[in-house]
Amino acid sequence: MRRVLFFLFIMIGGCQIFAQENAVNLSQNPASLKWSQIKTPHFRLIFPSNIQSLGERTANVLETVYQPVSKTLGKNPRPISIVLQNQTSVSNGFVTLFPRRSEFYITPPQDYTLLGTNNWLDLLAVHEFRHIVQYDKALTGSTKLMHTLFGSNGWGIVNSLAVPNWFAEGDAVGTESVLTHSGRGKIPTFDMALRTQLLTKGAYSYAKAVSGSYKNFIPNHYVNGYLMTSFMKTKYGAYAWDKILEGTYKMPFYPFSFSNNIKKVTGLKTEQLYKNAFDDAKQAWETQLKNIQETTVSPLKTAKNKFFTQYEFPQIIPDGRILALKSGLADIQQFVLLDKENNEEKLLELGIFNNAGMLSTAGPKVVWSEFNFDVRWGQKDFSVIKIYDFNTETTKTLTHKTKFTAPALSNDASKIVAIENSPENKCSLVILDAENGQEISRIQNPKNAFYLHPRWTENNEILVVKLLDGKKSIVTINPENSFEKELFSPIAENIAHPVKVENYILFNSGVTGIDNVFAFDTKTQKRFQVSNRKFGAFNPVVSTDGKTLYFNDFTENGNRIVEMPFNPANFLPFDESLNKPVKFFGQMLVQEAGENLLKNIPNQAYETKPYSKANIFNIYNWGAVFSSNSNNLNIGLSSQDLLSTTAISTGYSYNANEKTGQFFADLSFEAWYPKINLNYTNGQRQTDIYIDKSSPRDSLRSDKWNQQQMVLGVSLPFNFTRSKYYQSMEIGVNTAITQVSGYDLQDRYLSESFNGNVNSIIYTFIYSRQLKRALRDVAPRWGQSISFYARNMPFGGDLNGGLTSIQGSMYVPGFFKHHSIRLRAALQNQSGFKNPNGSPNNKLYIFGSPTFFPRGYSYRAFENLSTGSVEYRLPLFDPDWNFGRLVYLKRLKANFFADFGQGETNYNWTETQNGKTVIYKGSDKGNFTSIGFDFTAQFHLLRFSQQFEAGCRGIYLTNQGRFIFQPLVIDIGF
């Protein structure tokens, strides 16, 4: 029964949001970082002390957006903490309830399709605060009751299950598009993939659009949600979602409450809303394309790609071939070389690529940037420059622990210009030596303008896009004296990727509603349109002879590298008055607060105070929650500080198996270089044991006893990721002290204690190295891991024993793409079976084993144990089948395995009896072999965005000659 309940719990309850003990996932800043805070009427900003001016400005921005962003959902949120993170090179932001807060990663992105012409933190303020409003909107009716009873766990689970994720992100994108001058709804690239899909393939089913696919590229929930939420506001009023959410959260437990409330407001089911919104968008886009006369292009030949694949950022190498970045559903990011002879050559797979929207080659070299990570601090990472030499076929990391992105080689490949975004939020153009990565000079930027996509010109000047005060321009800069020249006046247009070809500057722009390549003539000061493609053209580069233009052209199968003659006489005239981009939020400007809410930001002075990292108590969860193993029901409190250094939980835990309860307290402190974990439990235990010495075994006895246990652990986690392999290592030492009293039975299980103490120390070492995975991979193609575990009793005690285990695992490619073979092996020694004279030890204590055991058999303890396993994992079928509203079946996959195990305990001792020496020998041996299969399905229930996985496992126990079958959740059999 317990196993069935566990299976149902994971299937329906959805996992980790209910977990108590293992829900904590902390990521910290360096311990030396000092923090400050600003309190406003609605926010508390917490930020590193060296960015005080940024904290002050962000405080004013947030107070400015508070009322307009809240307006159409009819909810003014309670005060909330905002944490500004400046140690990372990642551009991101999020809102969470665990505990309730928002975090802004302050580094602006080079991705102009995300940033547009906005200030990065302004964009985050509008988008993330809309999420805060959405969360607080849920505090009504039954959802408010769940929050009252269970804290953030109750609040979060209802919110995530009642309302689909496309609403949250789509609504936030719509809000940013209305209230800033350059939100994603105004950037054609944002909806380009969906636009292309609708105009070439048509709309997928609603279930497929919201759940995704392993065989087709599905535009993400930001795009789908933006169209649907904007359509709703335009057709049914700005306050339509207010009414829908109000009804949904009052009674959220009916699986289709959200859809029913949509129907109450609009008369449409969710599926009908989806269809109408997409039909409306398709019609608008078809109208947009009616008058387009496409420029003719010739695609470069590529490998035959069965699935959606991108080829981007073409660059020309000396032998005339085209270097491109390849990625897709079936491939991790890699450089490939293309030519006109139908050849595609794979060059190398990349590490954690920092996509700056460009590549740069010169001579036999190409440069790019990748993310590297601090060894210990999860909130601190770097962006380093790498260079590949085609002559020597070697890759070199030029910089270390830097914040560089968008590197570009000079024409002679001797220097690199790169953009640096410092932790102090300063943007700089830095000139580096291309041989050793050393800094040569730094260009002055007194107004702290934001730079994008630098390039060198033929006369060694730097060509770059400059963003300042919501407008962009293209400028040239003399690196010798930092003299800057604007090529044209700044404009509120999202331009990017400038390239100089003679007297022309080529660049990307979506000003017409479709991204294309444009040209600016520096002699005549006239602008032209170079490409006129239906879906999107980007990232131009001209051949060395100046006759051919290459760029990536978007198609229904992804970006492709195309070519066309480069002939200025064929450029199209540019008339800005004819530009009529499609906007799905036009009426929303009138309904909401009006465009460009942040044109004028107040300069209200707020007091700045130090923020102490000693503020470790921040209770966010209370009441009853299930533990991670589903046998326990915990009633208690959970706390996590806002800087994610300390997690504390305490309460009472009831064990359904033993029908006993214990008080518990857990502390995880990770502010220092070593992590410290402390666990304490105190309560009753119960066991049932047969006391018979021989058959028949019919004397079952029960007993309850008191047990106290304290576990203190120190560990060092390390992140060594520097390439296409994720690498991590952790070393740990734990001491466990267990005290038992009130145990009245004469016998015991070897894993339980008589009255007295059991004190042990645990030593652990884990190392893992795994290749990045493409979406279609069922497991890593390459990977290795090794773990060491030792536990002993150096302080003595009433019992004795010890365990040492080492196990390793290896992934290698299968026979076909996306298949994977996993090999495992383990050796274990469990000491204490014998007394010093070799006789059986009746004070043996059996520790729990970390070693994997052949599937289908119950674990047995031996003095020496060896195990091995071979697995072959593969995808079977990606059906994308929809069974009404109940189930969307996404993938079927299989795993075939063979497990082996051998254990042995030998006894050999002598005793003197009646003056005679008696020799005793005995042994306990076991051989365990099983072969079998796992068939699992990945699917979505009731339109939940959370993907589930379940299936069945069949095992043939060769020793016993019988089959057994088990239900399977992920890879856990029951």
Image: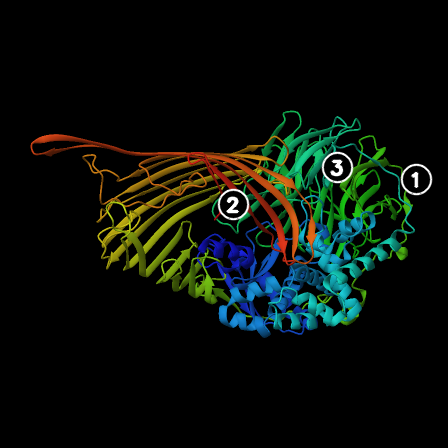
Q: Position of residue 130 (x, y in %)?
A: 65, 65
What kind of element bears circle 2?
loop
Residue at the (77%, 39%) spot, across then down: 560
* 3 or 1: mark nearer the eye: 3
Is tag 2's residue or tag 1's residue first in the polypeptide sequence? 1
- Determine whether 387 is above or below 706 in the image: above
Residue hosting label 3: 314
Residue at the (52%, 45%) spot, across then down: 971
Badge 3 amino acid:
Pro
Residue at the (10%, 34%) spot, across then down: 913
- Find the distance from the CA under tag 2 to the CA under tag 1: 63 Å
Is tag 3's residue or tag 2's residue first in the polypeptide sequence? 3
Is tag 3's residue or tag 1's residue first in the polypeptide sequence? 3
Residue hosting label 1: 569
- Find the distance from the CA under tag 3 to the CA under tag 1: 24 Å
Relative side of 905 to 970, left or right: left
What kind of element bears circle 3?
strand
Give residue 831's quadrant in the image: top left
- Determine whether 288 is above or below 300 in the image: below
Residue hosting label 2: 971
Q: Position of residue 708 (x, y in %)?
A: 29, 58
- In the picture, the quarter occupied by the N terminus is bottom left
Q: Position of residue 62 (x, y in %)?
A: 63, 67
Residue projecting furthest to the front = 696
Q: How is the image coloured?
A: rainbow
Quick one: label 1, few (<14), some, or many (20+) residues within 10 Å?
Answer: few
Relative side of 137 to 534, left or right: left
Q: Position of residue 598 (x, y in %)?
A: 70, 66
What kind of element bears circle 1?
helix
- Determine whether 191 is above or below 140 in the image: above
